[in-house]
Amino acid sequence: MRNLVLLCAVILPLAVTAEDGAYSPVVHDDFPRNVYWGDTHVHTSYSTGDANLNGGNTVSPSVAYRFARGEEVTAVNGEPVRLRRPLDFLVIADHAENLGIAYDLQTRHQALLAAPGGQTLLERYRAFETDRSQGMPIRGKDLGVDYERSVWQRVISRADAYNDPGRFTAFAGYEYSSPGTIPRVFGNLHRVVIFKDSARRTGQIVPFGADDSGRPEDLWQFLSDYEADTDGQVLAIPHNPNLSNGQMFALTDSAGGDLTTAWAEMRARFEPIMEVTQIKGDSETHPLLSPDDEFADFETWHSWGGRQFSPDEHPCCRGLPDGDPMVRKAGEYARSALKRGLALEAALGVNPYRLGLIGSTDTHSSLSTADSDNYWGKYSSDYPTPGRMTDQRSPGWPTQFWNMSPAGYAGVWARENTREEIFEAMQRREVYASTGPRITLRFFGGWEFRHEHANEPDLARLGYLRGVPMGGDLTAGPGGMAPSFLILAVRDPDGANLDRIQVVKGWRSDDGELHERVYNAVASDARKIGRDGRVKPVGSSVDVRTASYHNGIGAPELRVVWRDPDFDPGEAAFYYVRVLEIPTPRWTAYDAERFGLTDIPAEIPMVSQERAYSSPIWYHASAD
C-alpha cells in the first residue's frame, strides 16, 4: 500500500491518445508543459533591520513587484534599473520580526503613531536619524497586535493587487528568522513562509516570527493551525543552511532531543523544498564533504574578510558544543541532508529531508536580479561602485562583498502561471534551482527509457507516460532492473552554452552507511566519458579583461538517457541532475571592466561556471 501511495502522489493524469476522436494530439494532455521562473525570497524596506535601517532600502515594496514584472524602476541611488526578461512569480519575504516598522517611522504612518508606544518610538527614531552611532532598538511586539495586523494587511493586500493570474503570480509571504537554539551560538534557521491563499484567508492571522519562538517546531505548529483554522495551504522553505552551524539538517530536534516519527512527518509536510543557492553562497555541497566532486567548491562561503578557515576554527563556529566539525558541516548542505534523510527514513519510517531544490536571491534591495552582468548586490548599500568588491559592511560582517554570489532563481514546472499551479508544483517538488541562468531542465525516472528516447521530439510527453518527473518516487522495477533517467537541458536563450549533464546519486548500503557519487552522463563537443568516469574540461572562452565570452564551445542543448551502472535494488537511493554551463565572467569581472579596475586581489574569483540543480527522484528499496 505504501508503494501505491508513493506512485499515486507523483504520477499526473495523462492521456496520449484521442479516444473521443479529437484530431489535436494535445487535447487530453494533463501534465505541466511550462517552466515558470521566479524568486521566493525578496526583501524590501519592510524588513526593518537589515534591509532598511542597516541596508539603506527605503523604497516601497511596490518597487519589487514592478521590477519583477519587467518594468524599469529607480533604485535607491537614483539610477534606472531593469531586468533583461520579466519574472513569472515573486514572493516578497520581509522579516516577520518588526515587520514594516522602519518604513512606517520614515513615512510617519498613522497606524504606527496611533499604536501604544508609537510616539515614543518616533522620538527615538528622530534621535537615531541625527546620530546613528547610538543604534535604534526596536521591539515590534510592544506596539500591539492591532498594529501588527495593520501592517500584515498591507502586505497581503499588495500581493493580491499585483497577482495577475496567467501573467504574473504574487504570493503572500514573509520570513521567519530564527538565529538558532544553541545558547550564544548563531545558527541560521531561517525559513520563507509562502501562502497559497488570498487575503481572505491570510488576513485571519499575523505572521509567526522568531520573536514568538526560535524553535522551527513551533513554526510548523503555527502553520498546521493556520491550515486547520482557515482551510488554507502554506509551506516553509529553509534557506542558507550553509550558515546554520550544522543545525538546519541536524540529527536531533531544535532542543537537542531525539527525532521522532511525528517530528519527521511535520517537517516533511511543511518543508517540501529548500533554497539551495542564493546570494550568501551555494548550499549544494562542500568540498570537505564531497572531496571526489571536482565541481563541489562553487560559491562557497568559507572566508572571513578574505581569510580561509577550517570548519572548526571558522568564527561562525566558535563556541559550539564539542563534536566533530565535519558532522556539523553535514548538517549544512543539501547533498548531505538528502543522504541523512535516507537513514532517518530507515529509522523512523518517514524521511524529513525529502527535499526539492530551488534557488532564490535573498536580495534586500527589492531588486530580484540574478544576472552577473546586472548584479545590484544584497543590500541597497551594495549597489555597483568601484570599491564594493573589497568593502566590508562592518567589522563583524562575515565576508567581503566579493564573496557574495549573484544567485539564484526557482524554475517551476506547472500548467499555468497561477498561485494554485505554482504552489502545487512546489508541494510535489517538481521544481529546480538555477544559480541565475534560465536553463530549461527536464528530468524523468523510470524503467522503460531507452537511449533512443533521448531524441524524441516530445520528450516530456514520453517522460510522464513512462516514468515520474523530478520530485517523484520510484519503487522496485521488474526483475530488479536498474532505473533509467531521461534528461534534457537547454541553455538560457540569452546565456551560455552547456558543458555537461551530471547525475548525483546518494544511497544507503545494507550496513547503514551513506554514500554518494557524481556521474558524468553526457558532455558537449563530442567529449567522451572515460573509463574512470571523467571528462576532459570544456575549456574557456572568457576574456576577463573585457568581461566577455563566446559560445564557440559547449552545446545549446544536451539530451541523454542514463542508467545507473551501480544499482542495487535493495538499497534506498536518490538521484538529482546537475547541469553545468561553460565558464562565464563572474559579476566581479563585470565590475572590474565597467569601473576600469586593474589592481584586483588575487583571491577574488573573476570566472564562474554557473549551473542548475534538479529536485531529486527517490528510489525506495524493495522490502524483500
Image (cartoon, grey):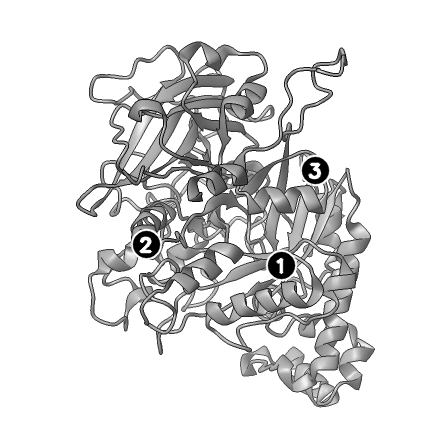
Please state which of the two labelled residues, at mark 3 or mark 1, is closer to the viewer: 1
Determine which quarter of the picture holds residue 114: bottom right
Please state which of the two labelled residues, at mark 1 or mark 2, is closer to the viewer: 2
Determine which quarter of the picture holds residue 603: top left
Q: Residue at x 72, y 42 (%)?
A: 418
Q: Is residue 583 above or below residue 172?
A: above
Give coordinates of residue 532: x percent, y percent.
Answer: 20, 21
Dot 2: what SS? helix
Q: Residue at x 55, y 25 (%)?
A: 464
Residue 86 numbered mark, or none: 3
Marks 3 and 1, how far apart in space?
19 Å
Residues 128 and 169: in front is: 169
Residue 344 numbered mark, or none: 2
Q: Is tag 2's residue or tag 3's residue first in the polypeptide sequence?
A: 3
The type of residue carrying mark 1 is Ala
Marks 2 and 3, how far apart in space?
41 Å
Residues 45 and 210: in front is: 210
Dot 3: what SS? loop
Label 1, on which residue?
93
The type of residue carrying mark 3 is Pro
Dot 1: what SS? loop
